[in-house]
Amino acid sequence: DAEDKKTKTLNSKILLDKFSNLYEIELEKLPYRLNLLDDLSTNENAHSKFLIRLLQYQPALINFLTFINSKNNHQFSFDINIINKPILTYEKMRIDGLIRENNKYAIIIENKIHNAVEQEHQIGRYIDKCKSIGFKLEQIFVLYLTKTERDNHSKQTWGKDYKLAHFQKRYSKISFKSNILPWLESYLEVLSTKEELIKSAIVQYIDHLKHFFNKKEIYSNMNKELQKFLSEELDFSTDNAENIEIVNDKISKLN
């Protein structure tokens, strides 16, 4: 009845107010954070540009492809020994990123970190564009970049003339969370003091990605306090299945 709804609404508001107050208190405890990538509104194009600009530094490109060769679920295999004078572009021919050397290889990079809408036959059209500038099908590689491992593309992206089977060892889906971020952290460790500017750019990008994925260490204590609050307020038990029901019920009431 109306009185019951009123009570539920009041209780929900009390919970949200208490949570909000705790959140503000914990937020005040955090150190001041400044990251240029956050402040400059890093969209999908900016991520593509940063990655390509980094990979234009040839040692970074070789390190990256070596990492992907060993850290992917699709048996992607690229012979880094054939790299000589690669040309790397972003947003050319409407392709997010392209790494190529004439008569050798073309590596298509499709970036979906912000889950941009998948266009019709998108990868298939990029393959056709690479073929139109002189590359054979067996020289074309595809790296499909997603936000997380859970994200994927549909079969239609290959178009009518191609399919995954045509790209054995020349295709990999890699996620920013599970692949790109760990690679950046590992590559940071091998850079020398002479590469200070590159190191500083990577440090900023790692920080940006961790903030994006909420993996930053500085939030760990705050998250623990917020989780503890919810556990006590919602009277969690040791039964996780029961706790999920409690949370779902509370979300329903809040909605």
Image: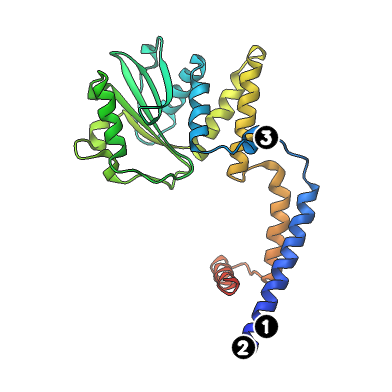
Residue 41 falls left or right of residue 84: right
Residue 111 falls left or right of residue 240: left
What x and y, as percent, mark residue 172? 37, 33
Say whether marks 3 and 1 touch (CB < 8 Å).
no
Q: Residue at image x 62%, y 35%?
A: 40
Residue 172 falls left or right of residue 50: left
246 to 4, vertically: above or below: above
Q: Which mark is residue 35?
A: 3
| Quadrant of the frame with the C terminus | bottom right
Residue 105 falls left or right of residue 244: left
Residue kind at label 3, given as amino acid type: Asn
Residue kind at label 1, given as amino acid type: Thr
184 to 112, vertically: above or below: above
What x and y, as percent, mark residue 202? 60, 26
Q: Which residue is mark 2?
A: 2
Q: Residue at image x 41%, y 16%?
A: 87
What x and y, as percent, mark residue 209? 58, 38
Q: SS at mark 2?
A: helix
Give residue 204's quadrant in the image. Answer: top right
What x and y, as percent, mark residue 166? 23, 32
Crowd rating for badge 3 (residues with CA inside 10 Å; few <14, some 14–19, many 20+)? few
| Quadrant of the frame with the N terminus | bottom right
Direction top: furthest residue: 84
Give residue 237's quadrant in the image. Answer: bottom right
Compare residues 215 and 15 and report the one nearer the observer: 15
Q: Which residue is mark 1?
A: 7
Q: CA distance from mark 2 to mark 1?
A: 9 Å
Q: Nearer the viewer, mark 2 or mark 1?
A: 2
